[in-house]
Image: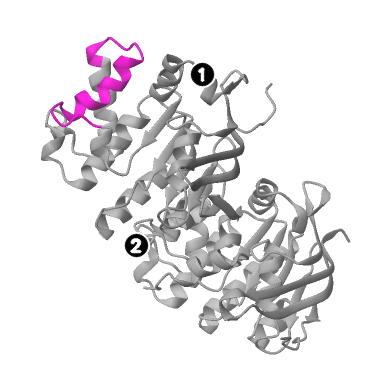
Amino acid sequence: MTLPAPLLTATDISLRFGAIPALDHVGAELWPGEVLAVVGESGSGKTTLLNVLSGRARPDSGVVWYRDPDGHLHDVHAMPEPRLRALHRSDWGFVHQDPREALRLDVSAGGNIGERLMAQGFRHYGRIREEAASWLARVEIDGARIDDFPRTFSGGMLQRLQIAKTLVTHPRLVFMDEPTGGLDVSVQARLLDLIRGLVGSLGLAVVLVTHDLAVARLLAHRIMVMQRGRVVEAGLTDQVLDDPQHPYTQLLVSSVLQA
Amino acid sequence: MTLMLRTDGLAKQFTLHLQGGIKLPVLEGVDLDVHAGECVALSGPSGAGKSTLLRALFGNYRADGGRIWVRHRGSMVDLAAASPRVVLAIRQQTLGYVSQFLRVVPRVPSLQIVAEASPAPDAEARARDLLRRLNIPARLHALPPATFSGGEQQRVNLARGFISGHPILLLDEPTASLDAANAKIVVGMIRDAKARGAAVVGIFHDTDVRDAVADRLHEVRPRQDAA
C-alpha cells in the first residue's frame, strides 16, 4: 500500500524575466484528486507558475517533484526531454486557453482524439474510433461530427474537443490555463459544468489557472492567490473567498460584480 | 452524553484593509459545548455575530484565536488548526452546514445538487426521498433550482444539508423563507437528527421553531467596534 502523498510538490521556485521577478520563492503542493486554483491578475505569475510546474518552463531555482503511480519521485526539470514528453502524452494533460494550440485543425475531430491514443501505442483502428466516439459523447459533441474538421467547430466545441483529446489517455494530473477564457458566458457555463463533472467522476488532480473567482469557487478545493510573482494567500476555496485576509485578496474579492 | 463540539476561547475579528485597515472584533472568548443529541440555539441581536460564529464552527471563517474541537472519527480534532485536507474530510464525514441561501450552480439539476453531497451509493434515492419530504415535487427534481422560489431553494439546500446524516449539524436560519407547513417539516427533520444522536447548533429567528427544537440557548453578545 502506498501512503497518501502529494502528486506534485514545488519548493521555493523563483524565476526572473530580466529585472522582473515572475516567480518569487513560490511553493505548492497538489494531492491526488485535488483541484487547486491559482488566481490573480494578468502579470501576477500564475501562468508562469503553471508552465514551471508542468515542465514547460525552467525555474532559476527551486525544484518540482512529481510522484509517479509507483510512488517514485521525479525532478520534473531534471527529466530527460523524451521522458517529460511521454509524461505529457499519458499521465499528464494540458488544457490551453486557446484550443488551437493543442488541436490540429486539418485533422478530423476523431483523428485529433485518436492521435493521442496512437502516441501511447494504440494500433487497433476500430478501438481507437470507438474511444474517440465515446469521448465525443462525454464532452457533448454530436457523434455525427467525428469526421468533421475542427475548423468548422465553434469556440466552445473546440474547447470541448481539446478536453476530450486531453482526457482520452486517463491522465492523473491535468494543467488548465484559463480553460473558459474568451468564451461567451452561456458557453462557459456549459463547459464549467462539463469540467466539474469530469474532474469529479475521474478523480483528476488539476492545477487550474484562472482570473475568474467564480470559476475557482465552482471547481477548486483550494486556492492560491498570486500577486507580483508571490503567493500572498492560500487556503480552502471558501475560506479565501468568504474571509480573505490579505489586502490584495480583499481587493480581488470585492471587485467582483454581483449579477 | 458524548461531547461532539467544544470551543475554547474562540475569537474572530475582521480587518478591512480597503477601509484603512479598520478592525472589527466580532467574537472573543467564546466557550461552547455541544453534546450528542442536543440542539443549542444561538441567541442575540442582529449583528451580534451569530452567523459569524456558525461560519467559524464550519471552518468557513478562519478563527484568530482559540480552538474548535470537533469529534471526528472518534477523536477530538482542532478544526481551527487543521490543514485544508483535514477540514475537507471533517466536512465530508462529520460536520454539515446549511447556509441561509443556496449557491446555485448553472445547469445542475436539483436532484444532483442534493445527491452529490453524499458519498453513499444510494444517494440519489435518498435525495429523492428528502426532496419529497420537503414538498419539492418530482417534476422539479430534474430542473436546476436557479428559477425556483426562495422557499424552494431553501428546501433544496436543506435536503443537501441533511442527506449525509452528519454527526454535527450547523443550521443558519433553516426556516427563514418557509411557510408554517414546511417549517414544521424541518422541525421534524431536526428532531429526527437529534434522535439519531446528532449535535445541532442553529440560528432560529422563528421562536416557535426555536422552542420546538432547542434544548438551550447560547447568547452571543455584540462587541464594540475598535479603531
Q: Which residue is mark 2?
A: B139
* Residue B158: percent from left, percent from top: 55, 66
- Relative to B120, B211 lies left or right: right
The chain containing the residue under callout 1 comes to A
* Magenta stretch, residue numbers: A103-126
- Relative to A130, A241 lies left or right: right
* Residue type highlighted by circle 1: Met
Q: Which residue is mark 1?
A: A79
Circle 1 or circle 2, nearest the eye: 1
User: Residue B146 in magenta?
Assistant: no
The quarter holding residue A8 reads top right
Structure colour scheme:
one colour
Instruction: Tell me if mark 1 has few (under 14), some (14-19) or many (20+) residues whose alpha carbon lies within 10 angstroms of its own.
Output: few
Q: Does A75 sit above or below residue B82?
A: above
Q: Report the Cα–Cα distance between label 1 and label 2.
A: 56 Å
For the point 35% across and 31% down, which residue is it? A166
Tag 1, which secondary structure? Answer: loop
Q: Nearer the viewer, residue B18 or A91?
A: B18
Instruction: Tell me if mark 2 has few (under 14), some (14-19) or many (20+) residues whose alpha carbon lies within 10 angstroms of its own.
Output: few
* Residue B51: percent from left, percent from top: 65, 76
Q: Kindly tell me whether residue A223 is visible in this rendering.
A: no
- Relative to B218, B119 lies left or right: left
Tag 2, which secondary structure? Answer: helix
